[in-house]
């Protein structure tokens, strides 16, 4: 129950450590996160902060959303996301204020959620990361197939839920315990070690890791 940020995936690059090691990083733009609504336990039953990022023209949003943004005194955003937080943190945040990348410290761990890259219809081996047979001489063309999927005479059928071919990617995905390598406060960028779900330009949600005790 800690405050996170809404970001946009810029792309991947690499940075070098002081010892000269190359570290692959994903760059996320988390600039201009604006507070749209503050929820309290007394009024709403739970404590949370609602943020928005990006910009949308007024003729592209509903009147209800237009009033929602106007009440907070912020420009209309593309994405709205709610983060549950502790009541004590709630009292320090003001409606319409901006939350910057400084809430994440270098070396801390975060969880990043987004929609994974869609890869279309995929075979069983690729979709479920199965091990294939040897592609050596005499193995016909059966080295990249799942093999037998049925049963013997009893029960004599394929059970529902069998891992087979189908659509791969394009689903909500979360990668946990990603290390924060660098923070650029001036440009509102955060550099995370490794990859995050989604393609360039996609929206992501960054939260403090739930499996790692970060120092605040």
Image (cartoon, helix red, strand yellow):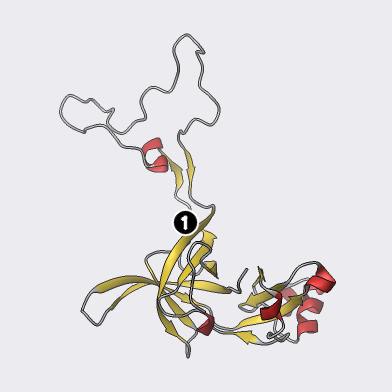
Residue, far left: 137
The answer to whether residue 132 is seen in the rendering is yes
Answer left or right for 191 relative to 39.
Answer: left
Q: Position of residue 28 (x, y in %)?
A: 47, 74
Total marks drawn? 1
Residue at image position (26%, 32%) is 133
Question: Residue extending furthest right?
Answer: 43
Which of the 4 image quadrants contains residue 128? Answer: top left
Please indicate, yes or no, whether residue 57 appears anywhere in the rendered image.
no
Residue 159 vs residue 121, the one in the foreground: 159
Residue at 48% x, 65% y: name it: 212
Whether residue 164 is situated above or below residue 210 in the rendered picture:
above
Give 117 or 150, whichever is nearer the viewer: 150
Where 127 sits versus 215, above or below? Answer: above
Q: Indicate the position of residue 176 as horizontal and vertical percent values.
A: 47, 61
Q: Give the residue at mark 1.
A: 117
Q: Residue at x 44, y 50 (%)?
A: 119
Q: Secondary structure at mark 1?
A: loop
In which quadrant is the N terminus drawn?
Answer: bottom right
Disc 1 crowd, CA 10 A, few/some/many (<14, 14-19, 20+): some
């Amino acid at each position: 129950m800690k405050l996170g940020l809404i970001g946009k995936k810029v792309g991947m690059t690499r940075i070098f450590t002081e010892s000269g090691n190359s570290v692959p990083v994903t760059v996320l733009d988390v600039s201009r996160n604006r507070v749209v609504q503050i929820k309290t336990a007394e009024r709403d039953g739970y404590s949370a902060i609602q943020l928005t990022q990006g910009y949308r023209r007024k003729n592209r949003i509903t009147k209800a959303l237009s009033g929602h943004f106007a009440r907070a005194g912020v420009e209309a955003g593309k994405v709205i996301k709610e983060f549950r937080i502790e009541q004590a943190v709630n009292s320090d945040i003001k409606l319409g204020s901006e939350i910057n990348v400084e809430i994440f410290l270098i070396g801390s761990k975060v969880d990043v959620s987004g929609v994974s890259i869609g890869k279309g219809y995929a075979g069983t081996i690729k979709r479920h990361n199965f091990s294939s047979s040897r592609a050596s001489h005499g193995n016909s063309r059966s080295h990249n197939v799942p093999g037998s999927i049925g049963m013997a005479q009893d029960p004599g059928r394929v059970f529902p839920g069998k891992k087979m071919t189908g659509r791969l990617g394009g689903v909500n995905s979360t990668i946990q315990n990603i290390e924060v390598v660098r923070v650029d406060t001036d440009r509102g960028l955060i550099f995370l070690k490794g990859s995050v779900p989604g393609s360039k330009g996609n929206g992501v949600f960054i939260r403090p890791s739930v499996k790692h005790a970060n120092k605040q």
